[in-house]
Image (cartoon, coloured by chain):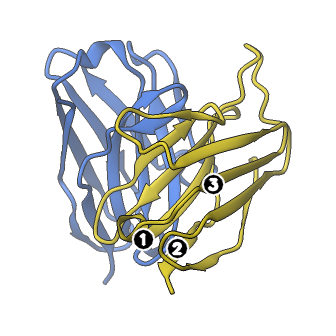
Chain colours: A yellow, B blue
Amino acid sequence: DVVMTQSPLSLPVTLGQPASISCRSSQSLVYIDGNTYLNWFQQRPGQSPRRLIYKVSNRDSGVPDRFSGSGSGTDFTLKISRVEAEDVGVYYCMQGTHWPGTFGQGTKLEIK
Amino acid sequence: EVQLVESGGGLVQPGGSLRLSCAASGFTFRSYWMSWVRQAPGKGLEWVANIKQDGSEKYYVDSVKGRFTISRDNAKNSLYLQMNSLRAEDTAVYYCARMDSRAPVGWGQGTLVTVSS
């Protein structure tokens, strides 16, 4: 299976400051259709996960534009331009290119 | 609005069986791949299985192959997960999710499965 490795695993951030999470896959995530099925999920405390970003850089409906995704091949990044209190939670990258899909270990974002 | 409601979780002894159900509404269920994802207490997410719209294709994570079976009933807008030979490491919250762009979205609230003697 494809291994997804996130860093850092813990991310203390000051309100209003930017944050960045890295995700690396053990093999290329380019699918036979030419798309790269790399997703980012947010799980707030006590809630189910929700997807923020799909196919590397596309925001899901209702996701604030302070969230952005980038990357290619095996290296990907989630950026939050200005962290707000509601962003506290755990963030997971997930690849859907090679089934079964696999998730990263999760990055816990907290407010300093 | 997409709504997914899981049920069927509970306490089961090692080696036992359990069948999870997921009732879907708010979208055309028969048009989507569906999946089960689980989360052990305090741990990360693990994709368990997914199933094609007509049930003709199914994929499983290695750790559940031969023990779990995913199925669906499009007439009832329902997704199922039959879990046999349960182990302590299967203890988790099990989420039902619709697939979109090869990823689980629109997750339910989950149902807790505890495997313990």
Disc assigned to residue A29: none
The residue pinned by badge 2 equals A109
Q: Position of residue A94 (x, y in %)?
A: 61, 47
* Residue nearest the viewer, comparing A46 with A60: A60
Instruction: Say above or below: A21 vs A2.
Output: below
The residue pinned by badge 3 equals A79
Q: Chain of mark 2?
A: A
The answer to whether B75 appears left or right of B115 in the picture is left
Q: Give the residue displayed 84% in from the left and 37% down from the top.
A: A73
The answer to whether B100 appears left or right of B75 in the picture is right
The verdict on a common chain for dots 2 and 3 is: yes
| Residue B72 at least partly seen | yes
The answer to whether A57 appears left or right of A15 in the picture is right
Query: Which callout, 3 or 1, points at the residue further toward the start of the chain?
Result: 3
Q: Position of residue B20 (x, y in %)?
A: 25, 48
Query: Which callout, 1 or 2, points at the residue further toward the start of the chain?
Result: 1
Q: Quadrant of residue B41?
A: bottom left
**Residues under labels 1 and 2: Cα distance?**
5 Å
Circles 1 and 2 in contact, beta carbons < 8 Å: yes
Q: Secondary structure at mark 1?
A: loop
Q: Give the residue displayed 42% in from the left and 66% down from the top.
A: A84
The residue pinned by badge 1 equals A88
**Residues under labels 3 and 1: Cα distance?**
14 Å
Q: Residues within 10 Å of mark 1 (few under 14, many from 20)?
A: some
Q: Chain of mark 1?
A: A
| Residue A4 at least partly seen | no
* Residue nearest the viewer, comparing A37 with B46: A37
Callout 3, which amino acid?
Answer: Lys
Q: Secondary structure at mark 3?
A: strand
Q: Give the residue displayed 58% in from the left and 66% down from the top.
A: A106
Query: Which callout, 2 or 3, points at the residue further toward the start of the chain?
Result: 3
